[in-house]
Amino acid sequence: MSARVSLLLLFLGIINGNQGARILGVFPFGAPSHYILGSTLMKGLAEAGHDVTIISPFKEKNPPKGGKWTEIILDDLMEPLKKLFIKHDPFKMEGQSGISTINLISTMSNIVSEGALKHNKIQELLKSNQKFDAVIITQFGIDSMKALANHFNAHLILFSNTAANSWLNHFVGNPSLPSFAPEILLNFPEKMSFMQRVKNTIFKFVSTLYHNIYFYPHQNTFIQKYFPNPVDIEDTLYNVSLVLLNSHESIFTAQPHVPCMIQIGGFHVQPPKKLPDDLQNFLDEAKEGVIYFSMGSNLKSQNLPVEKREAILKTFSKRKEKILWKWEDDVLPGQPPNVKLGKWLPQQDILAHPNVKLFITHGGLLSTTETVYHGVPIIAIPIIGDQKMNAYNGERLGYGIVLPFEELNEENLSRLMDEILSNPKYTNNAKERSRIMHDRQVKPLDNAVYWVEYVIRHNGARHLRVPYLELTWYQFYLLDVFLFIFAVIFTVLFVIKKAVSYLCRRSQSKTKKE
């Protein structure tokens, strides 16, 4: 009888241990690339048996078969962003300063944050009696929405679209000194010159002040306005249990990470699927190889300036290879016979085809990850955001060449295409980076699922937090210590100066009397 009871208790324990957690995912940005990453992560958690709710502007076309899947679709959230991007043409933003880019990102983030929080579906969610064990939020300027974790008494997990950087590191106390950590918008190499370190330090200081004096207080007003039981933003920003980084050493330079930061770069890449017949035949019959050209999901080739488009067309028309071009319009004026167009193309499956010899890309991180995964060299034409950082990383690691947008012309494009296709070192380096990406003990998506479950099992995993996280940002960077030291030195020098002056006056007075 006791054996049966023990078996029953063991069985109940196993069931209880495997109960799915309730997880809320917050990915409100209208960029398809952001949604691909967020939805892949949340679908992986659902397939692992969890009860998943995702907030986004998109409807999922392929819902997961396992677990429970609920969508909160934020209708019309993308309209204000479309108006913003009409005013700010991305192809004209290529040369703008890092400060201007930060200001634009902040404007965009404020629009998305307030638009999402005041949305009737989010307000209904806030007024509901739902419970969540964890809230996973994209770490991209929607800091006010982190208060959802406080509201639901859930563990806060951040998902970063890119590697560890200064926009994120301070939330978990990760080392981010300007001496070795280049700012994401400055495109400096990992080994910076003296002047680059000066510029990097000034930019980081200005950016830190901007966020602490303007951006975070502005985001805090949204918390006070739209949450039924508001908290101060300071009570949520640094209460992070886990950070999932969309990075890996195969793509980025190795960086320090505190224990709660986990790299899962490449987790969104799926095994190759069968291509549509027309694409399959086009790639199979390309005896001289295929060049794939795409500017990603946010930048559109159809919006390229006419002179740039004409330069690309003239270059492609002279190639012996076939060209596959992601072109968002029905017609491409002057389309050469060796060029095939597609408004949407299954990029991962295309890059997996052995006949694809070169990828001409904007340098977005999803595209960079996918090309490294499949070992295809690149010519990168970066425009905005982290694209320059990704592009120059590829050039430094030897699997690509950067072609600055202002230098894009027929001569330069032809020369770089000849260099990539004729010199095997680029393909060899791409294959080597691919081997590094594949050589893992655990699949990255499985690793992400494990760590989310780990945080829930260990009630927020407070033991992963570094103790110096309790310091303020100016204490962390020793600014108060340096000010104190300078004040002491100044005081000592001032006292010495006064003492010397006093002694000199006494000496002169004594001399006069004599």
Image (cartoon, grey):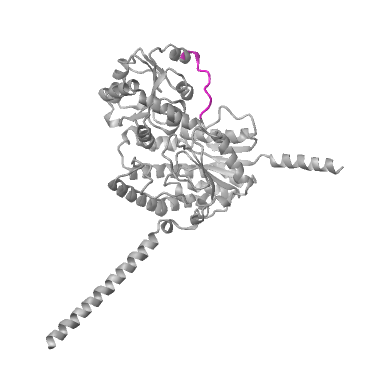
The number of callouts visible is 0
The residue nearer to you, when weighing 324 against 374, is 374
Q: Residue at coordinates 35% horizontally, 63% vertically from top-left?
A: 483
Residue 238, compared with residue 420, is above or below; it is below
Give the percent coordinates (x, y) of residue 196.
Answer: 30, 45
**In the shown orientation, is residue 116 left or right of residue 450?**
left
Give the percent coordinates (x, y) of residue 288.
Answer: 38, 13
In magenta segment, residue 153? no
Quarter of the figure with the C terminus: bottom left
Displayed quadrant of residue 87: top left
Q: Residue at coordinates 30% horizontally, 49% vertically from top-left?
A: 198
- Name the chief secondary structure element in magenta: loop
Give the percent coordinates (x, y) of residue 161.
Answer: 47, 38
Q: Work out whether residue 314 can be spotted.
A: yes
Quarter of the figure with the N terminus: top right
Q: Work out whether residue 133 can be spotted.
A: no
Q: Magenta part of the protein: which range? A: 269-278
Q: Hey, which residue is sitting farthest bottom in the picture? A: 514
The residue nearer to you, when weighing 158 against 330, is 158
Q: Residue at coordinates 61% horizontally, 47% vertically from top-left?
A: 127
The residue nearer to you, when weighing 60 against 238, is 238
**In the shown orientation, is residue 151 left or right of residue 91?**
right
**In the shown orientation, is residue 514 left or right of residue 213?**
left
Displayed quadrant of residue 11: top right
**In the shown orientation, is residue 479 left or right of residue 129?**
left
Q: Residue at coordinates 40% horizontally, 54% vertically from top-left?
A: 213
Give the percent coordinates (x, y) of residue 137.
Answer: 52, 42
